[in-house]
Image (cartoon, rainbow, N blue to C red):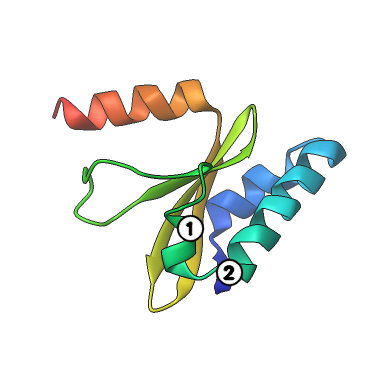
């Protein structure tokens, strides 16, 4: 699967410590080598509820960070990299609107 990293995610990635960057790079390698159907079997991969009129997914990059993904035509787009607590607040806020 091809990986595309959006500007917002790239900025977040560059702001991480080197060990966190390596962990995220390993997660991206796993995603890149997987087929979409296989990602559903990965315990690190979860579908978010449909809150923005597009299918979004999370992938556990490390214990403290989640990759926010969208997938279109066998291209995985990394939308953002955020902490799980911020993700929970974001989903909660968007669901309440």
Q: In the rendered view, does 37 fall on the left or right side of 78?
A: left
Near mark 2 (Cα within 10 A), the count class, few <14, some 14-19 or many ≥20, is some
- State the CA–CA distance, disc 1 to disc 2: 14 Å
Give x and y (percent) for residue 45: 47, 47
Is residue 38 placed above or below 88 in the rendered structure? below
Is residue 42 placed above or below 88 in the rendered structure? below
Task: For the N terminus, give its image quadrant.
Answer: bottom right
Q: In the rendered view, does 95 fall on the left or right side of 38?
A: left
Q: Quadrant of residue 83?
A: top right
Give x and y (percent) for residue 91: 31, 31
Q: Residue furthest left?
A: 97
Instruction: Give the total of numbered labels.
Output: 2
Task: For the C terminus, give its image quadrant.
Answer: top left
Near mark 1 (Cα within 10 A), the count class, few <14, some 14-19 or many ≥20, is some
Q: Which residue is mark 1?
A: 39
Is residue 23 placed above or below 33 in the rendered structure? above
Question: Which structural element holds mark 2?
Answer: strand
Is residue 89 placed above or below 82 in the rendered structure? above
Give x and y (percent) for residue 65: 61, 33
Identify the residue at image location x=26%, y=25%.
93
* Residues under numbered marks 1 and 2 in contact, where contact means CB atoms less than 8 Å apart: no
Q: In the rendered view, does 79 fall on the left or right side of 19?
A: left
Residue nearer the viewer, 63 or 89: 63
- Whichever of callouts 1 and 2 sits on the residue coming sooner in the sequence is 2
Identify the residue at image location x=48%, y=20%.
85
Q: Residue furthest right?
A: 18
Residue 67: mark in rendering = none
Identify the residue at image location x=57%, y=67%.
34
Residue 3: mark in rendering = 2
Identify the residue at image location x=34%, y=51%.
56
């Amino acid at each position: 699967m091809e990986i595309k990293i959006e500007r917002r995610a790239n900025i977040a990635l560059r702001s991480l410590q080197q060990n966190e960057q390596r962990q995220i790079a390993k997660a991206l390698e796993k995603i890149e080598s997987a087929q979409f159907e296989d990602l559903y079997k990965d315990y690190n991969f979860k579908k978010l509820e449909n809150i923005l009129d597009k299918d979004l997914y999370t992938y556990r990059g490390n214990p403290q960070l989640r990759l926010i993904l969208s997938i279109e035509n066998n291209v995985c787009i990394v939308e953002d990299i955020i902490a799980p607590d911020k993700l929970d607040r974001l989903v909660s806020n968007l669901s309440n609107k």
